[in-house]
Image (cartoon, helix red, strand yellow):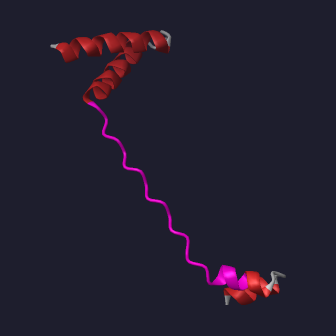
Amino acid sequence: MIQGILMSKGITPAAAHEVAYAAPVVAAEKKAKRKVGQYQKKWGRNLKALKAKHPRTASGTLMKKAHRQTRKEMRS
């Protein structure tokens, strides 16, 4: 059926045969997602809280503060 459709569109019989009877394409497996680390979770929470408290502060500054806070929390 596929071979007939391809030939009606102007593809040579040999090429149509190759395409029609070729093995199906196998989809690649999805990559396993990495587990989010404890530090990253705490840092995200701290950053979110800082953004709520200081919405107009530059994000880089808030990230530094969140990093310092998280390091302090992780030590104790």
Residue, far right: 10
Residue 9: x percent and y percent? Answer: 82, 82
Q: Residue at x 19, y 14 (%)?
A: 75
- Magenta highlight on residue 15: no
Depth order, front residue of 48/4: 4
Q: Is residue 34 left or right of residue 14?
A: left
Residue numbers of the magenta segment: 16-37
Magenta stretch mostly in which secondary structure? loop
Total marks placed: 0
Looking at the figure, which quarter contains the N terminus?
bottom right
Residue 51: x percent and y percent? Answer: 41, 17
Q: Quadrant of residue 71?
A: top left
Q: Quadrant of residue 43?
A: top left
Q: Residue at x 61, y 79 (%)?
A: 22
Q: Is residue 45 left or right of residue 74?
A: right
Q: Residue at x 39, y 17 (%)?
A: 52
Q: Is residue 66 left or right of residue 13?
A: left
* Residue 64 to residue 39: above or below: above
Depth order, front residue of 4/63: 4
* Residue 72 to residue 1: above or below: above
Residue, far left: 76
* Residue 2 to residue 48: above or below: below
Q: Is residue 54 left or right of residue 8?
A: left
Depth order, front residue of 13/49: 13
- Magenta highlight on residue 26: yes
* Residue 46 to residue 15: above or below: above
Q: Quadrant of residue 76?
A: top left
